[in-house]
Amino acid sequence: MPASIFDKVKMPPAAALLDGRLIDVDIEHRQITVGFDIKPEFLKPSGHVQGGILAAMLEHGIDPIVVALTEAEFVTTTVDLHISYMRPVEPGPVSVIGQITNMAKQIAYLEARLLDASGRLCARATASCLLMSSAPRRLS
């Protein structure tokens, strides 16, 4: 993959906890692909991934596209996240394709699709995220 802003930005600890890794960034289409490996700790007794873990993966699959598009000038905080679960997710690699659908001065609207190793759609999310300056803040 060509050099990107992520060569200079440290991976968030939560993304590391989820075993997140950048697969592709497409600035022209305002799209990013992030991969995850399902850990045994993510499973319910049924052997499928717990929905909250999938929600975290979907969210971590959309936030970085704002960072990439703004060259790390902005980071996001999620205002709302709506998820539709289509099928259970089993252990193995999954990917999340996140895309900015609209971005204003203070808020970004995003979509994400979580695909299993066979490329089947397992979950879909829409979100709105507040844009925040990535400059360090001073405590008063």
Image (tube, rainbow, N blue to C red):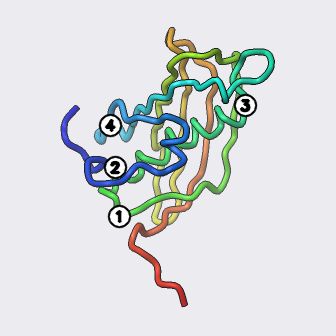
Residue 84 is left or right of residue 91, and the answer is: right
Mark 3 or mark 4: which is in front? Answer: 3
Which label belongs to residue 73? Answer: 1
Mark 3 and mark 4: span between their CA atoms?
26 Å
Kind of element beneath mark 2: helix
Mark 3 and mark 2: span between their CA atoms?
27 Å
Mark 1 and mark 4: span between their CA atoms?
17 Å
Mark toward the start of the polypeptide (2 vs 4): 4
Question: What amino acid is labelled 1 in the image?
Answer: Glu
**Image quadrant in which the N terminus is located:** top left
Which label belongs to residue 55? Answer: none
Mark toward the start of the polypeptide (2 vs 1): 2
Residue 101 is left or right of residue 30, and the answer is: right
Mark 2 and mark 1: span between their CA atoms?
9 Å
Kind of element beneath mark 4: strand
Q: Residue at x 51, y 8 (%)?
A: 118
Mark toward the start of the polypeptide (3 vs 2): 3
Pointer 4: residues within 10 angstroms few (<14), some, or many (20+)?
A: many
- Between 46 and 118, the one lying in front of the other is 46
Which label belongs to residue 68? Answer: 2
* Residue 122: % across, % down: 63, 20
Residue 133 is left or right of residue 85, and the answer is: left
Q: Which residue is mark 4?
A: 25
**Image quadrant in which the C terminus is located:** bottom right
Q: Residue at x 41, y 49 (%)?
A: 11
